Amino acid sequence: MPIEYYFSLALVMFLCGVCGVLFRRNILFVLMSIELMLNAVNLVFVSGSTFLKNLDGQIMVFFVITVAACEAAVGLAMVIALFRRYGTIKSEFFRILRG
């Protein structure tokens, strides 16, 4: 398969993640959208690495997966703490708290 297919799929995945971050009101969906964007970057790394016949992109994926796991753990811990404190995980409620 041509590499353009992989890049276009990664672009669609990344744009879905961006739309999820910008337009969703639930913090859990925002975290899932961030994970989707990171997986789109992983797809670009792996497809580019395969196309160039170089392992650098595949090694980079391990670092991205590590960052994604840390982000998920810290993000979910924050969501649980915020839900216990305020009883909601809607993002507009936390914007009101900020201002």
Image (tube, rainbow, N blue to C red):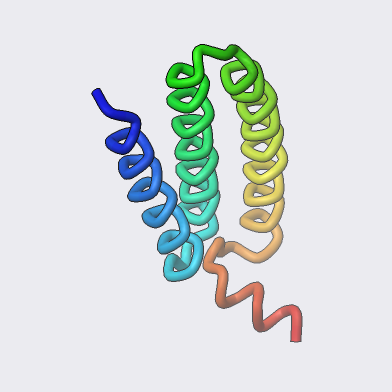
**Extreme-front residue of the structure:** 52
Residue displayed at 50% across by 20% down: 52
Compare residues 33 and 61 and report the one nearer the observer.
Answer: 61
Q: Quadrant of residue 82?
A: bottom right
Q: Position of residue 1 (x, y in %)?
A: 24, 23
Q: Is residue 72 above or below residue 16?
A: above
Note whether 56 is above or below 92 in the view shown: above
Residue sitting at 64 percent across and 18 percent down?
A: 56
Q: Check the image and name the residue furthest to the bottom.
A: 99
In the image, residue 12 above or below residue 40 = below
Q: Position of residue 88 (x, y in %)?
A: 56, 64
Residue nearer the viewer, 64 or 25? 64
Determine which quarter of the picture holds residue 16.
bottom left
Left or right of 54? Residue 33 is left
Lateral position of residue 50 relative to residue 70, left or right: left
Q: Residue at x 56, y 76 (%)?
A: 92
* Placement of the C terminus among the 4 image quadrants: bottom right
Looking at the image, which is closer to me, 67 or 47?
47
Residue 60, given in percent of the width and then of the height, sits at 65, 24
